[in-house]
Image (cartoon, rainbow, N blue to C red):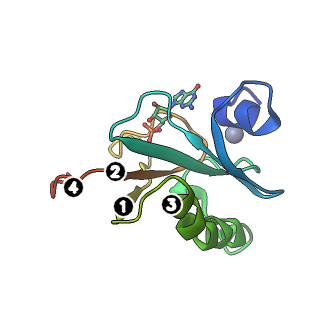
Amino acid sequence: MDCLFCKIAAGDIPSDKVYEDNQILAFRDINPQAPVHVLVIPRTHIASADEVTADNSALVARIFACIPQIAKKVGLANGYRVITNCGEDGCQSVKHLHFHILGGKKLTENMG
Ligand code: 5GP
Ligand code: ZN
């Protein structure tokens, strides 16, 4: 499958990794939207939040179980925002489920 984040997960495309285990990977966004901007992905291809099911939701739980330690590792001691863009109206550009962790400054209240 021609998927950018599958290639990053496989190590075929390099990334600035901040956390990895056998199920998930976290790496810095190439075009950061905040002083700290990390992406967390499942190694398994899931196209978006709209493709989460009872069969694969354990991977989402795994991501959220790891987010506190990832946030701590990249210095987000004062809070952060977790976002997933989904589909056309959600402005998802990479069609492999990913959660943005944004922080390192007081973020804007506007999320729309
Ligand atoms: P989306 O718009 O799908 O929610 O987020 C995709 C994110 O992936 C964007 O923030 C974009 O900057 C990031 N991105 C796109 N290509 C690469 C890449 O090759 N490496 C890294 N580290 N991030 C990427
Ligand atoms: Zn993929």
Q: Are marks 2 and 3 in contact (CB under 8 Å)?
A: no
Q: Amino acid at mark 3?
A: Ala
Q: Would you call the spot at circle 2 few (<14 residues within 10 Å), some (14-19), or many (20 or more)?
A: some
87 to 107, vertically: above or below: above
In this view, the mark in front (2 or 1): 2
Give the SS element for disc 1. strand
Give the percent coordinates (x, y) of residue 16: 63, 34
Q: Are marks 2 and 1 in contact (CB under 8 Å)?
A: no
Write down the quadrant of residue 52 in the picture: bottom right
- Residue wearing tag 1: 80
Q: Which one is nearer the viewer's eye here, 37 or 56?
A: 37
Instruction: Count the marks.
Output: 4
Q: CA distance from mark 4 to mark 2?
A: 7 Å
- Residue wearing tag 4: 106
Instruction: Work out whether mark 1 precedes mark 4 in sequence or the reverse, and give the earlier one.
Output: 1
Give the percent coordinates (x, y) of residue 31: 42, 28
- Residue wearing tag 3: 71
- Residue wearing tag 2: 104
Q: Are marks 1 and 3 in contact (CB under 8 Å)?
A: yes
30 to 64, vertically: above or below: above
Q: CA distance from mark 1 to mark 3?
A: 8 Å
The residue that appears at 74% across and 71% down in the rendered structure is 55
Q: Is mark 1 within 8 Å of ligand 1?
A: no
